[in-house]
Image (cartoon, rainbow, N blue to C red):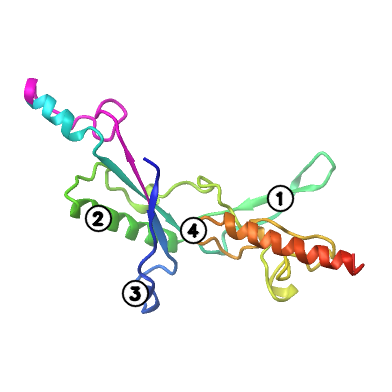
Protein backbone atom coordinates (compact mmCIF):
# COMPACT_ATOMS: atom_id res chain seq x y z
CA UNK A 1 0.00 0.00 0.00
CA UNK A 2 1.33 3.44 -0.88
CA UNK A 3 1.84 5.82 2.05
CA UNK A 4 -0.71 8.52 2.74
CA UNK A 5 -0.56 11.16 5.44
CA UNK A 6 -2.31 12.97 8.29
CA UNK A 7 -1.41 16.66 8.24
CA UNK A 8 -0.54 18.71 11.32
CA UNK A 9 -3.76 19.70 13.09
CA UNK A 10 -2.78 21.44 16.34
CA UNK A 11 -1.99 24.95 15.09
CA UNK A 12 -4.40 26.66 17.50
CA UNK A 13 -3.18 24.69 20.50
CA UNK A 14 0.40 25.47 19.60
CA UNK A 15 -0.34 29.18 19.19
CA UNK A 16 -2.03 29.16 22.60
CA UNK A 17 1.09 27.71 24.23
CA UNK A 18 -0.54 24.38 25.09
CA UNK A 19 2.26 22.28 23.55
CA UNK A 20 5.84 21.97 24.79
CA UNK A 21 7.46 22.11 21.32
CA UNK A 22 7.39 24.93 18.74
CA UNK A 23 6.78 23.27 15.36
CA UNK A 24 4.53 20.68 13.77
CA UNK A 25 4.69 17.20 12.33
CA UNK A 26 2.61 14.89 10.18
CA UNK A 27 2.08 11.14 9.95
CA UNK A 28 2.94 9.06 6.93
CA UNK A 29 0.69 6.04 6.98
CA UNK A 30 1.69 2.70 5.52
CA UNK A 31 0.09 -0.73 5.33
CA UNK A 32 1.26 -4.13 4.31
CA UNK A 33 -0.20 -7.40 3.15
CA UNK A 34 1.83 -10.41 4.16
CA UNK A 35 1.60 -13.41 6.43
CA UNK A 36 2.56 -12.90 10.09
CA UNK A 37 5.77 -14.89 9.72
CA UNK A 38 9.46 -14.10 10.14
CA UNK A 39 10.23 -10.41 9.71
CA UNK A 40 6.63 -9.34 10.24
CA UNK A 41 5.67 -7.18 13.24
CA UNK A 42 2.78 -9.60 13.73
CA UNK A 43 5.08 -12.63 13.97
CA UNK A 44 4.25 -14.70 17.02
CA UNK A 45 0.69 -13.42 17.43
CA UNK A 46 -0.69 -16.51 15.72
CA UNK A 47 -1.03 -19.48 18.06
CA UNK A 48 -2.58 -22.88 18.46
CA UNK A 49 -3.08 -25.80 16.10
CA UNK A 50 -5.42 -26.74 13.31
CA UNK A 51 -8.49 -24.56 12.95
CA UNK A 52 -7.42 -22.00 15.61
CA UNK A 53 -4.02 -21.51 13.92
CA UNK A 54 -5.72 -20.97 10.57
CA UNK A 55 -8.09 -18.47 12.14
CA UNK A 56 -5.19 -16.49 13.65
CA UNK A 57 -3.28 -16.52 10.36
CA UNK A 58 -6.31 -15.09 8.55
CA UNK A 59 -6.83 -12.50 11.27
CA UNK A 60 -3.29 -11.13 11.24
CA UNK A 61 -2.58 -11.49 7.52
CA UNK A 62 -2.58 -8.04 5.91
CA UNK A 63 -3.87 -6.34 9.05
CA UNK A 64 -0.90 -4.11 9.78
CA UNK A 65 -0.55 -0.34 9.52
CA UNK A 66 2.28 1.99 10.49
CA UNK A 67 2.29 5.67 11.45
CA UNK A 68 5.63 7.38 10.90
CA UNK A 69 6.22 10.82 12.41
CA UNK A 70 7.78 13.42 10.10
CA UNK A 71 8.56 16.55 12.09
CA UNK A 72 10.33 19.86 11.68
CA UNK A 73 13.75 20.35 13.18
CA UNK A 74 14.46 23.97 14.03
CA UNK A 75 17.93 25.59 13.98
CA UNK A 76 20.03 25.34 17.13
CA UNK A 77 23.47 26.57 18.21
CA UNK A 78 24.93 23.04 18.10
CA UNK A 79 24.15 22.54 14.39
CA UNK A 80 26.45 24.43 12.04
CA UNK A 81 29.29 24.03 9.56
CA UNK A 82 32.77 25.50 9.45
CA UNK A 83 36.00 25.18 7.47
CA UNK A 84 37.97 22.17 8.65
CA UNK A 85 41.28 23.36 10.13
CA UNK A 86 43.18 20.31 8.88
CA UNK A 87 41.40 18.42 6.07
CA UNK A 88 41.76 19.77 2.52
CA UNK A 89 40.39 18.66 -0.83
CA UNK A 90 42.50 17.72 -3.88
CA UNK A 91 42.87 21.40 -4.77
CA UNK A 92 44.30 22.21 -1.35
CA UNK A 93 41.17 24.01 -0.17
CA UNK A 94 39.70 23.38 3.31
CA UNK A 95 36.61 21.14 3.30
CA UNK A 96 33.46 21.80 5.29
CA UNK A 97 33.14 20.24 8.73
CA UNK A 98 29.59 19.78 10.00
CA UNK A 99 28.37 19.78 13.60
CA UNK A 100 24.86 18.57 14.30
CA UNK A 101 22.54 17.34 17.09
CA UNK A 102 18.86 17.24 18.00
CA UNK A 103 17.49 19.60 20.64
CA UNK A 104 14.83 19.05 23.30
CA UNK A 105 12.29 20.56 20.88
CA UNK A 106 12.60 17.55 18.58
CA UNK A 107 12.57 15.03 21.43
CA UNK A 108 9.40 16.53 22.91
CA UNK A 109 7.84 16.63 19.45
CA UNK A 110 8.56 12.96 18.78
CA UNK A 111 7.28 11.99 22.23
CA UNK A 112 3.98 13.72 21.44
CA UNK A 113 3.83 12.02 18.04
CA UNK A 114 4.44 8.54 19.45
CA UNK A 115 1.86 8.97 22.21
CA UNK A 116 -0.74 10.21 19.73
CA UNK A 117 0.00 7.44 17.19
CA UNK A 118 -0.42 4.76 19.84
CA UNK A 119 -3.73 6.34 20.88
CA UNK A 120 -4.96 6.37 17.25
CA UNK A 121 -4.16 2.68 16.75
CA UNK A 122 -5.82 1.69 20.01
CA UNK A 123 -8.87 3.83 19.19
CA UNK A 124 -9.18 1.88 15.92
CA UNK A 125 -9.21 -1.35 17.89
CA UNK A 126 -5.68 -2.29 16.95
CA UNK A 127 -2.79 -3.57 19.01
CA UNK A 128 0.47 -1.61 19.03
CA UNK A 129 3.30 -3.97 18.07
CA UNK A 130 6.22 -1.55 18.31
CA UNK A 131 7.82 -1.46 21.77
CA UNK A 132 7.51 1.85 23.59
CA UNK A 133 10.87 3.62 23.37
CA UNK A 134 12.09 6.94 24.76
CA UNK A 135 12.16 9.65 22.06
CA UNK A 136 15.97 9.65 22.04
CA UNK A 137 15.86 6.02 20.88
CA UNK A 138 12.78 6.24 18.66
CA UNK A 139 13.87 9.22 16.56
CA UNK A 140 15.67 8.48 13.29
CA UNK A 141 19.33 9.33 12.92
CA UNK A 142 20.20 12.62 11.22
CA UNK A 143 20.19 12.49 7.42
CA UNK A 144 17.91 9.47 7.24
CA UNK A 145 15.15 11.28 5.33
CA UNK A 146 17.59 13.11 3.03
CA UNK A 147 15.71 16.41 3.09
CA UNK A 148 18.58 18.47 4.46
CA UNK A 149 18.19 22.22 4.03
CA UNK A 150 19.82 25.37 5.35
CA UNK A 151 23.44 26.56 5.77
CA UNK A 152 23.14 29.30 3.08
CA UNK A 153 20.01 30.93 4.43
CA UNK A 154 18.02 33.53 2.51
CA UNK A 155 17.37 36.93 4.13
CA UNK A 156 16.92 40.65 3.70
CA UNK A 157 20.41 41.88 4.59
CA UNK A 158 24.00 40.57 4.65
CA UNK A 159 24.36 40.53 8.43
CA UNK A 160 21.58 37.97 8.95
CA UNK A 161 21.84 35.78 5.85
CA UNK A 162 24.01 34.42 3.04
CA UNK A 163 21.75 35.27 0.07
CA UNK A 164 19.12 37.84 -0.86
CA UNK A 165 15.49 36.97 -1.64
CA UNK A 166 16.51 35.65 -5.08
CA UNK A 167 19.20 33.31 -3.76
CA UNK A 168 22.03 35.61 -4.89
CA UNK A 169 24.99 35.51 -2.54
CA UNK A 170 25.61 38.86 -0.88
CA UNK A 171 29.37 38.47 -1.23
CA UNK A 172 29.53 37.06 -4.80
CA UNK A 173 27.42 38.95 -7.32
CA UNK A 174 27.13 36.21 -9.93
CA UNK A 175 26.60 33.30 -7.50
CA UNK A 176 23.01 32.07 -7.10
CA UNK A 177 22.08 29.32 -4.64
CA UNK A 178 19.24 27.34 -6.22
CA UNK A 179 18.76 24.45 -3.81
CA UNK A 180 17.50 23.83 -0.27
CA UNK A 181 20.41 25.71 1.26
CA UNK A 182 18.40 28.97 1.25
CA UNK A 183 15.84 27.60 3.72
CA UNK A 184 16.13 28.92 7.28
CA UNK A 185 14.40 25.78 8.55
CA UNK A 186 12.85 22.64 7.13
CA UNK A 187 9.10 22.33 7.58
CA UNK A 188 7.79 18.84 8.14
CA UNK A 189 6.47 18.77 4.57
CA UNK A 190 8.62 17.68 1.63
CA UNK A 191 10.60 20.77 0.50
CA UNK A 192 11.10 19.70 -3.13
CA UNK A 193 8.30 21.73 -4.77
CA UNK A 194 9.31 24.87 -2.86
CA UNK A 195 12.94 24.36 -3.92
CA UNK A 196 11.81 24.05 -7.55
CA UNK A 197 9.67 27.19 -7.32
CA UNK A 198 12.49 29.23 -5.74
CA UNK A 199 15.00 27.94 -8.31
CA UNK A 200 12.67 28.96 -11.16
CA UNK A 201 12.18 32.40 -9.60
CA UNK A 202 15.94 32.83 -9.14
CA UNK A 203 16.61 31.75 -12.72
CA UNK A 204 14.08 34.27 -14.06
CA UNK A 205 15.71 37.07 -12.08
CA UNK A 206 19.19 35.97 -13.17
CA UNK A 207 18.09 35.96 -16.84
CA UNK A 208 16.65 39.46 -16.46
CA UNK A 209 19.91 40.72 -14.95
CA UNK A 210 21.82 39.18 -17.87
CA UNK A 211 19.52 40.91 -20.39
CA UNK A 212 20.21 44.22 -18.68
CA UNK A 213 23.95 43.57 -18.82
CA UNK A 214 24.34 43.66 -15.05
CA UNK A 215 26.34 40.43 -15.11
In the rendered view of the protein, which quadrant contains the C terminus? bottom right
- Residue topped by disc 2: 120
Secondary structure state at the residue bearing disc 3: helix
Q: Is residue 117 left or right of residue 78?
A: left
- Residue topped by disc 4: 189
What is the count of numbered marks? 4
Report the predominant secondary structure element of the magenta stretch: loop
Closer to the chain start, of discs 2 and 4, is 2
Closer to the chain start, of discs 1 and 2, is 1
Secondary structure state at the residue bearing disc 2: helix
Closer to the chain start, of discs 3 and 4, is 3
- Residue topped by disc 3: 13
Q: Are marks 2 and 3 in contact (CB under 8 Å)?
A: no
Horizontal and vertical percent position of residue 111: 34, 57
Query: Magenta part of the protein: which range?
Result: 28-51
Reply yes or no: does residue 40 show up in magenta.
Answer: yes
Circle 3 residues within 10 Å: few <14, some 14–19, many ≥20: few
Image point 30% across, 34% down: which residue?
33
Q: Residue furthest top?
A: 50
In the rendered image, which quarter is residue 40 located in?
top left
Q: Measure how far apart labels 2 and 4 are at the Cα level.
A: 21 Å
Amino acid sequence: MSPTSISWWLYKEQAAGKLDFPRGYHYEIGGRFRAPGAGSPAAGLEDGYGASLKEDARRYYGAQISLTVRGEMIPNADSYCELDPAVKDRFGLPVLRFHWKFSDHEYRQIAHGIKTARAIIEKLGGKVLTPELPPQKAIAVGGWIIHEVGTTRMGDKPDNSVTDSYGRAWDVDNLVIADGGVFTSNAHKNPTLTIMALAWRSADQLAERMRKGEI
